[in-house]
Image: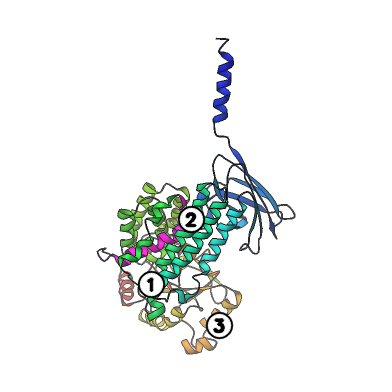
Amino acid sequence: MKIWLPFIVVLFLLLVSCKPRKGEITISGKIEGYHNKPVWVYPATSIYINKPYGNDLDSTITNSDGVFNLRILSTADQFFYVFSEDDFLLVETPIAASPNDSVFLKTSINNTSRPEFSGSNAEFNQLLFTQRQTIPRKFRRMEVFAKPIDGFQNYVDSVEEVANHKIDSFALASSNSANILDILKADTRLYLAFVRYDYLLKHLNLTQGVQEYFIPDKNYYKFNNNLLHKYDDFWFLPSYTMLADAMLKDDVQKNNKLEGNSLTKRFYLIDKVYKGAHREVALARLTRKFPDYLSYSNFYRIFEQVDSLLSGIISKPALKEYANSNINKVAHIKPGSLAPSINLPNVKGDSVSLTSMRGNVVLIIFWGTWCPPCLSSIPKYIEIQEYFNDDSVQFMFVSLEARANEVERWREFVKGEGEMANRLLKGDAFPGTHLVAKGQFANPQVKPYAVTSAPSYVLIGKDGRIVKPRVHLDNDLISQISELVGD
């Protein structure tokens, strides 16, 4: 046994040395104008739509010159994002590094559009950022989308050819791993595929002035050779989400066999047709549109199905947290729920609460003096109030205003003063209970109602519970209010 002992020890040491060792990745840099403040680094898979979810890899504080130093332990290539306070993304593209690499980032808290990289992988990171900046610029001129379909495809092909040439030339000259190079190819191809779908959305409007979707022949879609499935690993890229959104819209538009409204069709495609990361991203993104679907009669039925499917198929924590945050925005305003409290100042500056109207049917009108559709609806607002001219129905107008001068303009208008009031109200005071919400949609009194556009209308019963989180300003609304008053 003693004879074999040295050999056993040597063998053990060899085996230990063959195990992958964690390499330290150093991320350091200088942020002009950002001194003695926090910096975080997150894995790219913890970021979705420029917001971090989950735990950071490391954090630190910049010194008095804005210099910072972060460290990550990793056995494989890493893609990560660096954030300053208030979830401010310092570089819009992922930063790549391999074990034992160092990355130096120089940028400014006031202008993050021109970051400079040095250290290992510097050329790659600069190219990834540059490609992501320059390619979209090729499509900022709307006349590109007005080209005939063949001309447009030739233009995109030429952009793609130039981009691929840069990537291939860089790949030949670099020592980067295939995994790191793949993200550069993925981001370029995904974005250009999105642009080809975007053409279908914009072309007819630009050439004929109609808001219709352009349906091409099937050959047009050859560019999308299962791209989303091929690049599943890069689902966190904004270009992946942009393409997933565009494909879902396209599938709804061109599939005449799908039945139901837009929400029903979208959910069917996600539930029954899509697979893999494409399915997860599409489902998470569907929740973002929930406020737009609140007026649909079947919204909360689909809402429950989405919630159930979410827990079953989404494996990526960032996507799950993103979707749940959107679900929570509308979960508490379903019919039958107690209406979230509102307590806002009126024209005189006195606070008025929603609870003070308990015992009446209440129609909340979220509007603004800056909103043309709201102003054009004023005759209808006055008409419906004249129809219900007793105290059993209250009309609460919540004006979404941003700055102090806009609040003052609102106050004058509601009182019937000023040029706009003379034109729209004939100089009379605007009837109804008028309150103002500074900060517009971000006002904490407004956010619980998931208001994303104006005008938006919420119908509340005599018991203070939501009857419908969104209603349309039409004759059906008069019937609905009349029925509630009769109750």
Q: Which amino acid, by three-letter code, is at mark 2?
A: Lys
Q: Sequence order check: which comes first, mark 2 or mark 1? A: 1
Task: Judge whether 147 appears above or below 166 on screen.
Answer: below
The residue where tag 2 is placed is 185
In the rendered view, does 228 fall on the left or right side of 403?
Answer: left
Q: Sequence order check: which comes first, mark 2 or mark 3? A: 2
Task: Judge whether 199 appears above or below 412 on screen.
Answer: above
Kindly state the secondary structure of the residue where label 3 is placed: helix
Res 467 seen here: no
Q: Residue at x 53, y 63 (%)?
A: 444
Q: CA distance from mark 3 to mark 1?
A: 55 Å
Q: Position of residue 287 (x, y in %)?
A: 41, 58
Q: Report the magenta residues as a range.
A: 233-258
The residue where tag 1 is placed is 150
Task: Judge whether 151 appears above or below 257 on screen.
Answer: below
Q: CA distance from mark 2 to mark 1?
A: 24 Å
- The label nearer to you, 2 versus 3, is 2
